[in-house]
Image (tube, grey):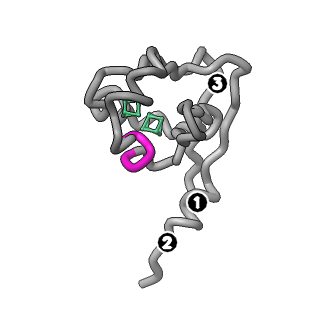
Amino acid sequence: MSSTTLEEKQYLLRFRCDTKSHLTVLDHDICATKCPDKICTVFCPAEVYKWEGSRMQVGYEGCHECGSCRIGCPYQNIKWEYPKGGHGIVFRLA
Ligand code: SF4
Ligand code: SF4
């Protein structure tokens, strides 16, 4: 029996990116001063959140829409919405 690797599965993902982010970090000062672990950079499977010096960068284009950041941020500092209709991730079957 053959198994599919994670890389092969990710190859099946397609993204229809909007020009506006559906993810918002509400207060960047909280990230900088109260959240030393920056846990969103760990739990997000798509590595959307990247800490760049003094600010959280949000690469919303690659979001898998798993919803983890709605509950994973210890400060409820991420506003998560679905992408606008017709945008976002598209799962294709092999
Ligand atoms: S987990 Fe929340 S508070 Fe912490 S760095 Fe990420 S967005 Fe900021
Ligand atoms: S919904 Fe999931 S994939 Fe998208 S930014 Fe949040 S944790 Fe990452």
Magenta-tinted stretch: 39-43
Q: Earlier in the sequence, mark 1 or mark 2?
A: 2
What secondary structure is marked by label 2?
Answer: loop
Is 22 a magenta residue?
Answer: no
Residue beneath disc 3:
87
The residue drawn where x is 54% and y is 32% is 56
What separation in Å lies between label 3 and label 2 (alpha carbons)?
27 Å
On the picture, is 59 further left or further right than 43?
Answer: right
Q: Earlier in the sequence, mark 1 or mark 3?
A: 3
Q: Residue at x 37, y 47 (%)?
A: 43
User: Residue 87, image x and y in percent?
Assistant: 64, 24
Which secondary structure is most common in the magenta stretch?
helix
Which secondary structure, mark 3? loop
Residue that badge 2 annotates? 4
| Label 3 or label 2, whichever comes before in sequence order | 2
Pointers 1 and 2 in contact (C-beta within 8 Å): yes
Q: Which residue is mark 1?
A: 94
Looking at the image, which residue is at 45% across and 15% down?
26
Q: Percent position (x, y) of residue 9? A: 54, 61
Q: Quadrant of residue 41?
A: top left
Distance in Å between CA atoms under marks 1 and 3: 21 Å
44 left or right, relative to 84? left
